Amino acid sequence: MAAFKNISPARIVTQRSIEGLTETGASLRFDLIETTKHLVIQRYEDGVGISTTTFLAPARDRAEEAFAVAVQMLTPPAPVLAEAAPVVAAPVAAPVADLAEVIASVATVITVVAEVATATPVVTAPVARPRGPNRPDTEIEVWCEGDLKVVMVQGRTYHYDLRRGEDTIEKVPATRAWRAERQSLIDKASRMLPGATA
């Protein structure tokens, strides 16, 4: 069975299905599904969903006509396979015979809803894309004087390092204000130089 848009079983009022063969011998099936707001005609060829047509509830006549035209596409006139009975509310004090009819009616509706529910495709969560190996950090020297330097580190996170030799003195994460952060580290490094005035 094909996967059309999900129709909630709770919204289905009736469902009629008709099945037969085309002139070429392919299996052909039409479903007329009446929901609380729409009438939907779904077409299946060889068990594969081909098309779906939706009518608003006020256009019931047009939907019935379209379904009748679809039935004429079948080579032998095919009988209606299944029609769900509408749910009948049981009176509070029902006689025993009426109660048995209500139970049978409810059992029919439950069976039809269960058949429709099993035909509904299961929605799964998207699968996470596997990540490749982490690339090594890229270091770009932004400022250097003597043994002091400011380095921009690009990797999983971007940040600026103030280093003396190979030792990191200060590490500042890069944000949207990266220019100001870079300049403040350069200013701090220039004040740390011998002979610099504070």
Image (spheres, grey):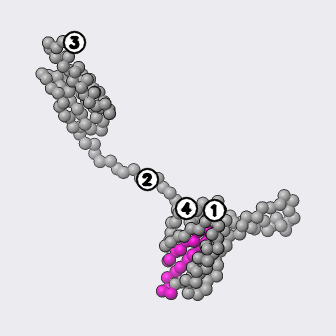
- Point out the frontmost of discs 3 and 2: 3
| Foreground of the two, 60 or 52 | 60
Please tell me which of labels 2 and 4 falls first in the chain.
Answer: 4
Badge 1 element: loop
Please tell me which of labels 3 and 1 falls first in the chain.
Answer: 1
169 in relation to 110, above or below: above
Question: Residue type at mark 4?
Answer: Asn
Badge 2 element: loop
Kindly check if marks 4 and 1 are in contact, taking CB atoms under 8 A apart as contact: no
Q: Is residue 106 visible?
A: no
Q: Which mark is residue 6?
A: 4
- Point out the frontmost of discs 4 and 1: 1
Q: Viewed as shown, does residue 96 lie left or right of 152?
A: right
Disc 3 target residue: 198
Question: Residue type at mark 1?
Answer: Lys
Disc 1 target residue: 37
For the C terminus, the image quarter is top left
Q: What secondary structure predominates along the stretch shown in magenta?
A: strand
The answer for how far apart the CA atoms under marks 3 and 2 are is 57 Å
Task: Tell me where the magenta segment starts and ends, as one range.
Answer: 23-46
Please tell me which of labels 4 and 1 falls first in the chain.
Answer: 4
Residue 61 pos. (x, y %) = 64, 73
Disc 2 target residue: 126
Question: Residue type at mark 3?
Answer: Ala
The answer for how far apart the CA atoms under marks 3 and 4 are is 71 Å
